Image (cartoon, rainbow, N blue to C red):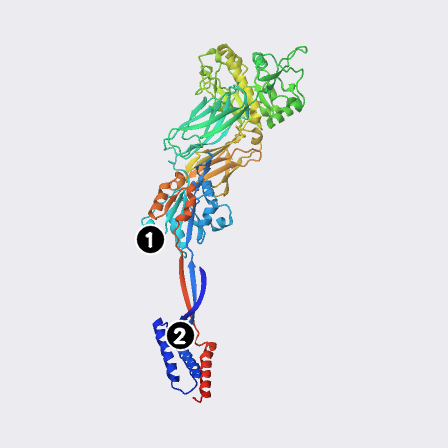
C-alpha cells in the first residue's frame, strides 16, 4: 500500500459557478446601492463600497463552508504466486541440455530460476510470492530472496489443486494477477469439479512452465560400470554393469545389454535384461594395440523414458609391459614341465622359475633366470605374480612369507597355489602364507578315486577366467565338462570339502556330478580376496591333460587368464571386498526387503563382529541404522529383513572401518498411490489448467515472454479528508479588519 499526498481548497457546500456569479453580482449591487446617494467624495464612495463588497463576499464564502481537502491515493500492488515443484519426481534425470548431457528436472528448474532478468521484470511494481509444493504448499520466500539453495525435492506425493487452493486462500490480502506453475505435472489427485472455474471467475490465470521431457514413464538405464584398470591384447576383460529401472515385474519390459568396440563397431558381448536382475557381467577382448575404447549400450525392447542414460563409455588401458612371474616348484612333475614352457614362450610374460629339487649345477629356467629366491621386499616387488607349487613351507623363511603376505594385502602381488601330493597345502598349515589359502589347510586333502571333470561358476565370469569358447553366449568349452570325454578328465585331484572353505572363498570351478561323485560342491578352482590383492588355488596338477584334446590352446588360456586376473587385481575396480545386496531393489511402501552383506576380504572379515551396522539415508536427508546379524558362527554373510515405510530413493552403506568406497547401494521405494510409481511427466494436466483458467503454456526456453502475459490486477483508491477553515482565528481577522476600516471611514465622513 503506497500513499500519495495532495492538498487543495474545497467547500462543505459547493455551489455551481452560476450561483457564485449571481451572488457576487448581488453583493456588488448591494455595496453600490448603499453608497450611491451619499454626499461624500467619489473616491471615498469607491473605497468604502469596496470594503462593503469584500465583507459581503467573505460572508458568502463562510456560508459555503471553506475547507482544506487532503487526498490520500492508496495503491494496492497485485501479486504473482510462483509455485515450485519439490516432489520426488523432480529427481528424475530426463532433461537433455544443448550439449547433449542429461540433467534432472530439478536442475532444469534451477536453470529457469537463474534467468534473473525475466524474474526482475515479473516482480517490477508487484509482489512475487515464492512457494514450494508437493502434497501441500509451503513458503520458499526466505530461500529465494536470500539466494539460498532450495530444499531438495523429496515429497512422496503431489497434489497440485490442493496446493493452489491453500496458497490463494492464505494470500488473499493482495489481488492475485497470476499463478506461475513450474512442475512436471505429476499429481496424485485429480482436478476437482469447479476448480478451474473458480480461478477463472476470480481472474487468476495459470501460466504453466513445463519441466521434464514428454515420455511414457518406463525407463531403464545404466547406473554404473566397473572395469579393470588395464588389460592385455587378447585378454578376457570382465565389465560389470549395474542397471536401474522404474518398471515393475508386471510390465513387459526387457532388452539387451551390448558391449561394443567404438574403434571397430563390433559387438563383443551381449546379455538379455531380466526384470528381477540389476547386475550383469559382460566380457570383452581387446584385439589391437593402444587404449581400447568400448561402449556399454542398453537396447530396450519397449518404450524408454530416457534414452541418453542407455550408454556408457569405457576406456581400458592396454599395457605392452610383460607380466613378471615368479614360479617356485618343489619337484619336476608334469604340470611344472608344461607350465614352465608356457611361461618361457609367452611373450607377455617375463618369468623366473626356481625348481628346488634340481642339482646345484642345474641352470634355473625362465627368461629372467634367478639363482636364489628373493629375500627382501624390494626384490619381491620385481614380480607381479608368484606361483607356489608343491613345496615344503620351510622353503620360504618367516621373513619371506611375511613380505609376500604384506604385498598381497597391499595389492602389489598376486599369489597362485598349485596343489600337490606331497606338501601343498598341508605343510603350510599355521604359516603366515596360510592366510592366503582359500580354505583351512590343517590336513592334506584326500584324493578323488575316479577321474573328474570341471565346470565353471558365475564367479569365474566376474573374474574373467575360464573363458575358452568362441561363442559369446557360452564362453566355456562344454567338452571339458563332458563325462564321456576321457582326455578332459583329471585323474588326480585334491578333494577339498566345502565345510573347510573360508567364508571369503569364491568357487570358480567345481566337480561335475557323476555316479562316483554325486555331489558338485567340491571345488577345483578357488579364489579369495585378501586385502587389496587376491589369491587363487588350483586343486589339481593335471590341467596339462587338456593338451591331448585341444593342443596348447586350452592350457594356455587357463593359465594366462589366471595370471592376468591376479596381475591386474592391484588396479582392478571390480570389487572392494564387500558386497551389499538389496533384494528386491524396487518395492512398494510396506513391503519387506532383504538386506545382505557379503565380505570377501579376509582382512576385513577378521575385524567384523556378529553384528554389522548399515547406514540408511532417507530421501529427506535423515540417517538411520539397520542391524544385520551374521548367518552362522563361521560365515562371511550378514543379513536382515526390514520394511521401508517411506517412499523415495534410499542409500544403504555398511559401516565397516577398513573397507573402501563403492559398496553403497540404492533402493527405490515406491508409493503405489504416489508419483514414484511412475515418474513420467504429465504435461497434459498443466496444459489443461492453463487453458481453462485463461493462462498459457510456456516452454523453459521461452521464459522471456512471461512478463508481457501477466495482467495488471493492482487496485488504486483515493481517500479525501476535509478540514474547515472558517473557524480559523487568522481568517476571522480579515472580515473584522474590513469592518473596522469601513466603520472608521464612515466615522470620518460622519456617516456612523
Q: CA distance from mark 2 to mark 1?
A: 46 Å
Depicted 315 relative to depicted 711: above or below:
above
Name the residue located 47 percent from the left edge and 47 percent from the top edge. 117
Where does the image place residue 71, in percent across and percent down from the top left? 43, 65
Residue that badge 2 annotates: 65
Q: Residue at x 54, y 37 (%)?
A: 655
From the image, which quarter does the N terminus lie in?
bottom left
Q: Most extreme residue toward the left, as rendered?
A: 193
**Residue for badge 1:** 201
**Relative horizontal placement of residue 275, taking residue 559 as reference (left or right):** left
**Label annotation for residue 683:** none
- Please state which of residues 416 and 484 is positioned toward the viewer in this rendering: 416
* The C terminus - image quarter: bottom left
From this viewpoint, is residue 539 visible?
no
Secondary structure under the numbered disc 1 in the rendered image: helix
In the rendered image, residue 174, in percent from the top left (x then y), is placed at 41, 56
Marks 2 & 1, CB-CB < 8 Å contact: no
In the rendered image, residue 356, in percent from the top left (x then y), is placed at: 64, 14
Q: Is residue 184 above or below residue 550?
A: below
Judged from this view, the residue extending furthest toward the bottom is 750
- Asked whether residue 117 appears in the rendered view, the answer is yes
Amino acid at each position: 500500500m503506497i500513499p500519495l499526498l495532495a492538498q487543495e481548497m474545497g467547500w462543505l457546500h459547493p455551489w455551481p459557478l452560476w450561483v457564485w456569479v449571481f451572488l457576487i453580482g448581488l453583493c456588488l449591487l448591494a455595496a453600490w446601492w448603499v453608497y450611491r446617494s451619499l454626499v461624500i467624495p467619489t473616491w471615498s464612495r469607491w473605497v468604502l463600497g469596496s470594503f462593503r463588497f469584500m465583507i459581503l463576499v467573505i460572508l458568502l464564502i463562510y456560508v459555503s463552508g471553506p475547507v482544506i481537502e487532503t487526498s490520500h491515493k492508496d495503491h494496492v500492488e497485485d501479486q504473482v504466486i510462483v509455485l515450485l515443484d519439490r516432489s520426488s519426481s523432480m529427481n528424475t534425470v530426463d532433461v537433455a541440455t544443448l550439449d547433449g548431457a542429461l540433467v534432472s528436472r530439478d536442475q532444469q528448474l534451477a536453470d529457469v530460476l537463474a534467468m534473473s532478468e525475466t524474474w526482475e521484470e515479473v516482480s517490477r511494481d508487484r509482489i512475487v510470492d515464492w512457494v514450494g509444493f508437493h502434497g501441500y504448499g509451503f513458503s520458499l520466500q526466505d530461500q529465494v530472496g536470500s539466494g539460498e539453495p532450495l530444499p531438495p525435492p523429496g515429497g512422496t506425493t503431489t497434489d497440485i489443486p490442493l496446493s493452489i487452493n491453500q496458497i490463494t486462500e492464505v494470500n488473499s490480502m493482495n489481488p492475485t494477477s497470476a499463478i506461475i506453475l513450474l512442475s512436471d505435472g505429476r499429481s496424485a489427485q485429480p482436478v476437482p469439479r469447479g476448480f478451474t472455474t473458480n480461478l477463472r471467475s476470480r481472474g487468476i490465470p495459470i501460466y504453466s512452465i513445463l519441466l521434464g521431457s514428454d515420455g511414457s514413464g518406463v525407463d531403464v538405464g545404466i547406473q554404473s560400470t566397473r572395469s579393470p584398470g588395464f588389460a592385455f591384447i587378447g585378454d578376457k576383460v570382465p565389465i560389470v554393469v549395474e542397471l536401474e529401472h522404474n518398471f515393475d515385474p508386471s510390465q513387459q519390459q526387457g532388452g539387451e545389454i551390448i558391449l561394443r568396440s567404438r574403434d571397430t563397431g563390433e559387438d563383443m558381448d551381449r546379455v538379455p535384461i531380466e526384470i528381477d536382475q540389476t547386475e550383469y557381467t559382460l566380457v570383452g577382448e581387446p584385439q589391437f594395440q593402444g587404449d581400447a575404447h568400448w561402449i556399454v549400450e542398453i537396447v530396450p525392447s519397449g518404450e524408454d523414458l530416457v534414452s541418453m542414460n542407455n550408454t556408457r563409455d569405457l576406456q581400458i588401458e592396454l599395457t605392452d609391459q610383460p607380466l613378471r612371474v615368479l614360479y617356485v616348484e618343489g619337484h619336476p612333475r608334469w604340470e611344472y614341465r608344461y607350465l614352465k614352457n608356457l611361461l618361457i614362450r609367452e611373450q607377455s610374460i617375463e618369468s623366473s622359475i626356481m625348481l628346488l629339487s634340481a642339482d646345484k649345477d642345474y641352470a634355473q629356467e625362465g627368461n629372467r633366470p634367478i639363482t636364489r629366491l628373493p629375500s627382501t621386499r624390494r626384490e619381491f616387488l620385481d614380480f607381479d605374480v608368484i606361483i607356489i607349487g608343491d613345496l615344503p613351507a620351510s622353503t620360504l623363511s618367516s621373513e619371506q612369507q611375511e613380505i609376500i603376505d604384506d604385498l598381497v594385502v597391499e595389492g602389489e602381488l598376486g599369489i597362485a597355489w598349485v596343489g600337490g601330493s606331497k606338501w601343498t597345502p598341508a605343510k603350510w598349515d599355521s604359516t603366515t602364507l596360510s592366510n592366503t589359502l582359500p580354505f583351512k589347510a590343517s590336513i592334506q586333502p584326500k584324493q578323488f578315486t575316479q577321474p573328474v571333470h570341471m565346470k565353471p561358476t558365475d564367479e569365474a565370469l566376474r573374474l574373467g577366467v575360464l573363458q575358452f569358447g568362441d561363442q559369446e553366449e557360452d564362453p566355456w568349452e562344454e567338452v571339458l565338462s563332458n563325462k564321456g570325454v576321457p582326455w578332459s578328465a583329471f585323474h588326480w585331484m585334491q578333494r577339498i570339502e566345502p565345510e573347510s572353505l573360508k567364508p571369503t572363498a569364491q568357487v570358480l570351478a567345481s566337480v561335475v556330478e557323476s555316479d562316483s561323485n554325486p555331489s558338485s560342491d567340491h571345488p577345483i578352482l578357488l579364489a579369495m580376496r585378501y586385502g587389496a590383492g587376491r589369491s587363487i588355488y588350483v586343486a589339481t596338477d593335471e590341467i596339462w591333460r587338456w593338451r591331448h584334446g585341444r593342443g596348447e590352446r586350452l592350457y594356455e588360456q587357463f593359465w594366462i587368464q589366471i595370471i592376468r586376473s591376479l596381475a591386474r587385481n592391484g588396479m582392478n575396480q571390480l570389487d572392494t571386498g564387500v558386497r551389499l545386496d538389496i533384494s528386491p531393489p524396487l518395492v512398494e511402501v510396506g513391503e519387506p526387503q532383504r538386506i545382505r552383506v557379503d565380505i570377501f576380504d579376509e582382512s576385513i572379515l577378521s575385524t567384523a563382529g556378529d553384528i554389522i551396522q548399515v547406514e540408511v539415508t532417507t530421501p529427506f536427508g535423515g540417517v538411520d541404522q539397520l542391524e544385520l546379524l551374521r548367518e552362522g558362527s563361521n560365515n562371511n554373510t550378514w543379513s536382515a529383513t526390514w520394511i521401508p515405510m517411506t517412499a523415495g530413493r534410499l542409500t544403504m552403506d555398511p559401516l565397516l572401518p577398513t573397507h573402501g568406497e563403492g559398496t553403497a547401494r540404492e533402493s527405490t521405494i515406491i508409493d503405489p498411490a504416489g508419483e514414484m510409481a511412475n515418474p513420467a511427466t504429465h504435461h497434459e494436466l498443466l496444459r489443461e489448467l492453463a487453458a481453462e483458467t485463461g493462462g498459457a503454456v510456456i516452454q523453459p526456453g521461452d521464459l522471456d515472454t512471461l512478463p508481457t502475459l501477466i495482467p495488471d490486477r493492482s487496485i488504486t483508491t483515493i481517500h479525501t479528508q476535509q478540514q474547515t477553515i472558517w473557524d480559523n482565528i487568522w481568517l476571522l481577522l480579515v472580515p473584522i479588519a474590513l469592518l473596522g476600516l469601513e466603520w472608521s471611514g464612515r466615522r470620518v465622513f460622519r456617516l456612523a
